[in-house]
Image (cartoon, helix red, strand yellow):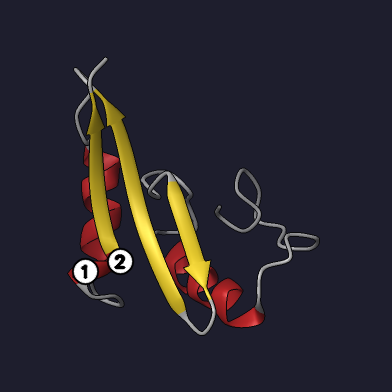
């Protein structure tokens, strides 16, 4: 779950402060836009996070997701990202 997905308001999400800080840093690095953020932004204490993008074939990863990944890789290791493809 992305804290405040669909808006930039994190109140009431139940997300820990450290996660909100990660999200806000990525949002700022992405030009303040949610476009391209992966479908799932999951976390588990203490500090473990994952970014997962789900595509139903024939859909492919788009330019906005590639841009987000390039940006996010400046802050996070590749092992925190996955792309899941499902037959459509």
Q: Residue at x 60, y 48 (%)?
A: 5
| Spot occupied by residue 50 in the image (x, y as percentages of width and height) | 38, 63
Q: Is residue 57 above or below residue 72?
A: above
Count of numbered badges drawn on the protein: 2
Q: Are marks 1 and 2 in contact (CB under 8 Å)?
A: no
| Spot occupied by residue 33 in the image (x, y as percentages of width and height) | 47, 51
Is 36 on the left-hand or right-hand side of 33?
Answer: left
From the viewer's side, name the closer residue of 84 and 3.
Answer: 84
Q: Which mark is residue 23?
A: none
Can the viewer see residue 17 in this picture?
yes
Mark 1: give few (<14), some (14-19) or many (20+) Cα within 10 Å: few
Residue topped by disc 2: 72
Q: Give the mark, 1 or 2, whose residue is nearer the N terminus.
A: 2
Q: Residue at x 23, y 45 (%)?
A: 83
Tag 1's secondary structure? Answer: helix
Residue lying farthest to the right in this orientation: 12
Q: Is residue 54 above or below residue 79?
A: above
Is 22 on the left-hand or right-hand side of 18?
Answer: left
From the viewer's side, name the closer residue of 84 and 67.
Answer: 84
| Spot occupied by residue 32 in the image (x, y as percentages of width and height) | 49, 58
| Spot occupied by residue 46 in the image (x, y as percentages of width and height) | 51, 85
Tag 2's secondary structure? Answer: helix
Q: Quadrant of residue 29?
A: bottom left
Judged by depth in the image, the label closer to the viewer, 1 or 2, is: 1
From the viewer's side, name the closer residue of 83 and 34.
Answer: 83
Mark 2: give few (<14), some (14-19) or many (20+) Cα within 10 Å: many
Can the viewer see residue 29 in this picture?
no
Is 10 on the left-hand or right-hand side of 79?
Answer: right
Q: Residue at x 32, y 44 (%)?
A: 53
The quarter of the picture where the C terminus appears is top left
Q: Residue at x 22, y 39 (%)?
A: 63
Residue topped by disc 1: 79
């Amino acid at each position: 779950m992305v804290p405040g997905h669909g808006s930039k308001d994190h109140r009431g999400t139940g997300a820990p402060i450290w996660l909100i800080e990660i999200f806000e840093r990525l949002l700022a690095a992405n030009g303040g836009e949610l476009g391209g953020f992966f479908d799932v932004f999951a976390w588990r204490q203490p500090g473990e996070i994952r970014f997962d993008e789900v595509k139903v074939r024939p859909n492919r990863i788009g330019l906005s997701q590639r841009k987000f990944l390039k940006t996010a890789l400046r802050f996070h290791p590749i092992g925190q990202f996955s792309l899941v493809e499902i037959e459509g």
